[in-house]
Amino acid sequence: MLEGLRIASQHRIGRIVLGLVMGFIALSFAVWGIGDVFRGFTSTRLAKVGSGEISVEAFRGAYQNELRRLQQRARRAITNEEARRFGLDQQVLQRLITELSLDQKAKALGLAISEDETLRLTREENVFKGPTGKFDSDRFKQIIRDAGYTERSFLVEQKGSYLRKELTDSIVAGLEPPRLVLEALHRFRSETREIDYFLLPAAAVGEVAKPTDEELKKYFDDREQSFRAREYRKVTLLTVTPASLAKPQEIGEAEARKLYDEVKAKRYGTAEKRHLRQILFASKDEAEKALERLGGGLAFDQLATERKLSQKDIDLGLLEARDLGDKQIADKVFASPQPGFVGPIQTAFGFAILQVEKIVPSVFTRSYEEASDELRREIARERSVPSVRKLHDAIEDQRTGGKALGEAVKSAGLDVTTVEAVDSTGLDPAGKEIAGLFGSEDLLKAIFASDVGVDNDTVPTRDGGYVWFEIAKVEPARQRSFAEVKEAVEAALRGEKQQKALTERADALTAELRAGKAIEDVAKGSGAETRHVNDVKRAPHPELSTAAIVAIFDAPPHGAGSAAVEGGRLVFQVKSASTPAYDPASIEAKAAAEQLRPAFTNDILEQYVGALEKVFNVSINEHALQAATGGADQNQ
């Protein structure tokens, strides 16, 4: 056939016929959409961002590099199908779009960085430093080679990275989480309640009759899903917090006493207050002459009248030392043991004479001896904060190199904890809470959002620490048969009936408390004894269950309520509720701000990048994206 075509093409008529045939074939391809195949092979642009573009080759290289790093962390091969299921292609593409958007904005602003400065900053990166703490050329070459870079391509990438960082740092520089948010978080975490309570035992409503098989089968059929075997996960954990690294025994008495003197007024009582009145003078001589007249018997009110000042002008009110704003002025005003006149004192507005009209002494509820252990722990925790960060960086460097968590922590001299099986609520297969490990809902959510072999982000703790975890094994949930769970069904049915009767009884007792009856009398009528608990917070408590704590904080101050607990129902009355004043200088406030800052700045940057992408009118060639990751065929 080919020979026939060659002969035909040598004659004019043959060439015309061949031209018609080929034209018809091309038209057929266009009609059936085959032209897209040819255009796809010639197209090199995957996405357009303003005047810039992301080529298929650039995306494919970034995608393969990220896939290689993911495989190193998982220590197994990962197919393109798995990677796409995890959204790796979209993550890489979004990163490239973000970088290109920032690059164009940096260029528009005229930002630049020299090659010498790029080299200097690269040499200062901790990841490239050897055991001596200095730049290690061999380590540098090995790391970039493992990442798929040449030295030149890596420095080009670093140059762009530093410019983008310069731009983003300028956007979020100085940004702090709003004080309103921090105060709200402080109130939520720090509110403390005192309660009286008693336990209404299950026996208070008598024995529940044994259900029939028909009742049990119907109960199971109606609630079949609730008798599924839950999913359990085996987890390796490492917790590094200021509290876990703190060494309070190394804190001396002088340091602890100094902190006590600084905070005793805020935490352990009320500071001394003085009722002050003030008259300002333009010069020191004028103020000294006025002070002499006051010492000679002139009334302060009369002096104020002479200077045409009202009571509103001279009365400062009842103030603490810190309210004066100037330590030197406060020291002079609060040095006098008795009411009287103080001055002249130079202020920003002139020379002042103050009258101490009244002194309200300080009152403290805890002595230094009672608070010393707590203060030593606080100082030790604050001192250990840099060590937490240092350990965090050291462990992350090891994990970035592909080491498992257990291997990474050995170099830091730490030990991991293994939980053999835990469900999404923090319970073991026997239904018991795993104490001390799952105080944070964020940690449990992260554990059940992950999978075996996944390299997980750390979970921050409330006090500025971190928790690392790895999933070692997943035991999937499954449906169990009626015969398999018959005993559990009977226990659940009888328990439900008993709990219903118990709840009705507890509600009646709670109504008596709300009507004004003393809790001691209500408890006595139920054959129970009352107990008192101080310092109840929205946190794990050794005496109260999570459900009880939730109910306690759902009730208003001086209100009453009840909650289901092990062995019966807890009936309580809130005796008092208090929240300490927010202190932005406290360890807790600083830790909260530190934890919220990344999320706050990331949110600002996401909004900024999103606005840039709108300005640059980002467009994506979806077919080229699918083809670049080997997914085009699946979507045809």
Image: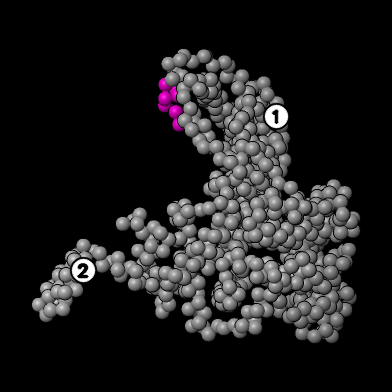
Residue type at tag 1: Thr
Where does the C terminus fall, quadrant-wise? bottom left
Task: Give how far across and how far down residue 396 sits, in percent.
Answer: 66, 59
Q: Quadrant of residue 344 in the image?
A: bottom right
User: Cα distance, mark 1 to mark 2?
Assistant: 103 Å
Look at the picture and state if 546 lies above or below 7: above
Q: Please tell me which residue is depicted at 60% across the width and 38% down the height of the picture.
A: 422
Say the numbered circle drawn on residue 53.
none
Neighbours of disc 2 within 10 Å: few (<14), some (14-19), many (20+): few
Visible in this render: residue 282?
yes
Is residue 222 found inside the magenta-colored segment of the image? yes
Q: Nearer the viewer, residue 92 or 5?
A: 5
Task: Give how far across and how far down residue 254 sits, in percent.
Answer: 90, 58
Look at the picture and state if 471 lies above or below 130: above
Look at the picture and state if 139 lies above or below 462: below
Task: Give how far across and how far down residue 179 sits, in percent.
Answer: 61, 63
Neighbours of disc 1 within 10 Å: few (<14), some (14-19), many (20+): some
Q: Earlier in the sequence, mark 1 or mark 2?
A: 2
Magenta: main secondary structure: helix
Residue type at tag 2: Leu
Q: Circle 1 sits in a helix, a strand or a loop, which is it? A: loop
Kindly identify which residue carries mark 2. 2
Q: Circle 2 sits in a helix, a strand or a loop, which is it? A: helix
Q: Nearer the viewer, residue 311 or 187?
A: 187
Q: What residue span does the magenta drawing correspond to?
A: 218-226
Q: Nearer the viewer, mark 1 or mark 2?
A: 2
Q: Please tell me which residue is depicted at 69% across the width and 68% down the height of the picture.
A: 139
Kindly identify which residue carries mark 1. 530
Looking at the image, the residue that sits furthest to the left is 13
Is residue 138 found inside the magenta-colored segment of the image? no
